[in-house]
Image (spheres, grey):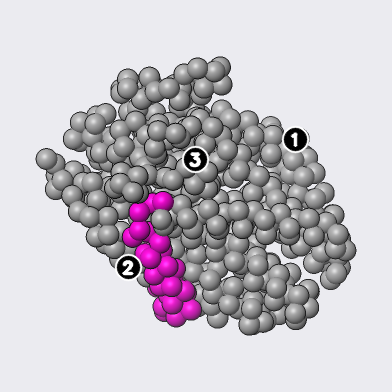
């Protein structure tokens, strides 16, 4: 087998499974359903589906076309489209990926530890105290670092080691092989959960809470911002992750079909995960005679995954509870670790190309830096730090990244617009027009809204957010200087 063959995806299915591994993450499995509950149930799904076709698939396709056309990672692609200093935008995305990777690998570590806790039957009655005090050793504020949680750090190291063994191989032997096993397994387990919970006492009530539409919510501007925020985060848009995967495409890959399948697949997993979760929560409500509304009070992935679900595990009894807990947290692990693969692959691809080093060295250095930075998210103030950074790193920054992609590759560079993926059937032509008109307007609107919310706020969290952006921009310019050839 030639070297060029080993560095491309084996087939269309492997490429799609790998992209699904990137898309299906904590937001898909844990927070989508709570966002539905918070924002009008079935009424939330209507704008979400609209956004998926008007916004999600076109942006996925744009990133896919960039990688497929030039076979380059994001930084080099910006350099080709905008010149050397255009690479600053690419490095900004890489640094965002590095920051996201640092906390994403820790969250994946949570799922590893909780899979063990579930199998060992270690969940106490007070699951909130166990999570925050025993497991995280949380400190009261952002300004108090607290102590390093040994459980979290050891689990994070295990995830990092596993990721290294997968990623040092070529994409078809590592990422594609693992994702082609893990992603169908995730879908089967969650679908089985969703079906089974419909037959347990109170389980069907979960469907009512999940899907019951409150159409008055559609008049609230907040729902539209949360739809687009969830979509951008879930599909990893604006970070160059899809560009990184798509530079390994071969001649037989149908990009338009692949991106449609990935977007719909991510939505499907979101829905079946919601049915499974809400069915279990409704069962807890039925068994303990607790109002459903008093159980689900937040769209936080931490509350739903690591506080509420351990309570659910306990009501299934000592034997069945262990099985349910292990399967659920293993699903969360799959969603997390496949996301880690895509984040590290994206960063390492840019390092490999810009610093002219081997894949093995780029992967090793990338994972070393990501695990080193992850220590900050293993400390007692980790949740406070995450709350401070998230609005910038997985909010404002991703919007800037998506807008930059459109400007650079739909307006400035003419080569990308001429790609066959944007031509032919009416649907593809619509995607191209949407990227030039509708999507930038929505992105700009949400970006202005996010910045408007920050007005007048001067606290430590705000300083951390905007300080991160300042440092990331300075480092991006420095990398441009270092790698300019």
| Residue 369 screen position, x and y as percent | 30, 63
Q: Residue at x 32, y 68 (%)?
A: 372
| Mark carried by residue 372 | 2
Residue range highlighted in magenta: 145-172
Foreground: disc 3 or disc 2: 3
Q: Residues within 10 Å of mark 2 (few under 14, many from 20)?
A: few
Please tell me in which quadrant of the rendered image residue 224 appears: top right
Q: Secondary structure at mark 3?
A: helix
| Mark carried by residue 216 | 1
Q: Is residue 281 above or below residue 67?
A: below
Return the disc, 3 or 2, that comes first in the chain's sequence.
3
| Residue 375 screen position, x and y as percent | 37, 70
Residue 431 or residue 312, whichever sits in front: 431
Residue with the mark numbered 3: 12
| Residue 144 screen position, x and y as percent | 41, 72
Q: Residues within 10 Å of mark 3 (few under 14, many from 20)?
A: some
* Residue 448, visible in the rendered structure: no
Verify whether residue 394 appears in magenta.
Answer: no
Q: Secondary structure at mark 1?
A: helix
Return the disc, 3 or 1, that comes first in the chain's sequence.
3
Q: Residues within 10 Å of mark 1 (few under 14, many from 20)?
A: few
Return the disc, 1 or 2, that comes first in the chain's sequence.
1
Q: Is residue 99 above or below residue 224?
A: below
| Residue 204 screen position, x and y as percent | 85, 54
Determine the CA span between mark 3 and mark 2.
Answer: 35 Å
Residues at marks 3 and 1 touching, judged by CB atoms closer than 8 Å:
no
């Amino acid at each position: 087998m030639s070297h060029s063959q080993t560095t491309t995806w084996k087939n269309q299915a492997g490429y799609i499974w790998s992209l699904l591994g990137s898309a299906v993450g904590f937001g898909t499995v844990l927070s989508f359903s709570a966002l539905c509950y918070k924002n009008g149930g079935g009424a939330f799904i209507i704008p979400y589906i609209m956004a998926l076709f008007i916004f999600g698939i076109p942006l996925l396709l744009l990133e896919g076309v960039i990688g497929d056309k030039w076979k380059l990672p994001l930084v080099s692609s910006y350099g080709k489209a905008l010149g050397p200093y255009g690479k600053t935008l690419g490095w900004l995305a890489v640094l965002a990926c590095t920051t996201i990777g640092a906390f994403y690998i820790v969250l994946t570590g949570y799922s590893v530890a909780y899979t063990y806790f579930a199998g060992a039957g270690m969940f106490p009655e007070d699951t909130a105290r166990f999570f925050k005090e025993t497991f995280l050793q949380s400190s009261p504020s952002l300004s108090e670092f607290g102590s390093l949680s040994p459980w979290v750090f050891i689990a994070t190291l295990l995830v990092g080691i596993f990721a290294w063994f997968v990623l040092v191989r070529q994409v078809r032997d590592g990422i594609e092989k693992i994702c082609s096993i893990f992603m169908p397994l995730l879908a089967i387990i969650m679908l089985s959960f969703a079906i089974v919970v419909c037959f347990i006492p109170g389980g069907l009530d979960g469907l009512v809470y999940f899907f019951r539409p409150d159409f008055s919510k559609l008049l609230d501007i907040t729902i539209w911002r949360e739809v687009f925020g969830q979509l951008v985060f879930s599909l990893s848009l604006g970070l160059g992750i899809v560009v990184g995967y798509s530079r390994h495409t071969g001649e037989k890959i149908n990009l338009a079909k692949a991106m449609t399948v990935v977007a719909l697949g991510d939505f499907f997993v979101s829905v079946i995960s919601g049915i499974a979760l809400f069915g279990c929560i409704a069962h807890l409500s039925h068994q303990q005679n607790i109002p459903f509304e008093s159980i689900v009070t937040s769209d936080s992935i931490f509350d739903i995954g690591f506080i509420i679900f351990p309570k659910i595990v306990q009501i299934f009894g000592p034997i069945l509870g262990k099985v349910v807990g292990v399967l659920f947290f293993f699903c969360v692990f799959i969603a997390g670790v496949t996301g880690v693969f895509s984040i590290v692959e994206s960063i390492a691809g840019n390092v490999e190309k810009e610093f002219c080093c081997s894949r093995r060295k780029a992967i090793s250095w990338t994972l070393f830096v990501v695990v080193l930075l992850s220590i900050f998210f293993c400390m007692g103030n980790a949740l406070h730090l995450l709350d401070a950074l998230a609005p910038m790193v997985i909010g404002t920054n991703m919007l800037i990244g998506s807008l930059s992609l459109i400007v650079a590759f739909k307006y400035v560079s003419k080569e990308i617009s001429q790609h066959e993926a944007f031509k032919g059937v009416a649907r593809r032509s619509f995607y191209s027009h949407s990227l030039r008109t509708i999507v930038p307007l929505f992105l700009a609107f949400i970006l202005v809204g996010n910045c408007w919310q920050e007005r007048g706020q001067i606290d430590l969290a705000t300083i951390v957010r905007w300080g991160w952006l300042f440092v990331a921009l300075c480092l991006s310019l420095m990398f441009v200087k270092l790698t300019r050839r």
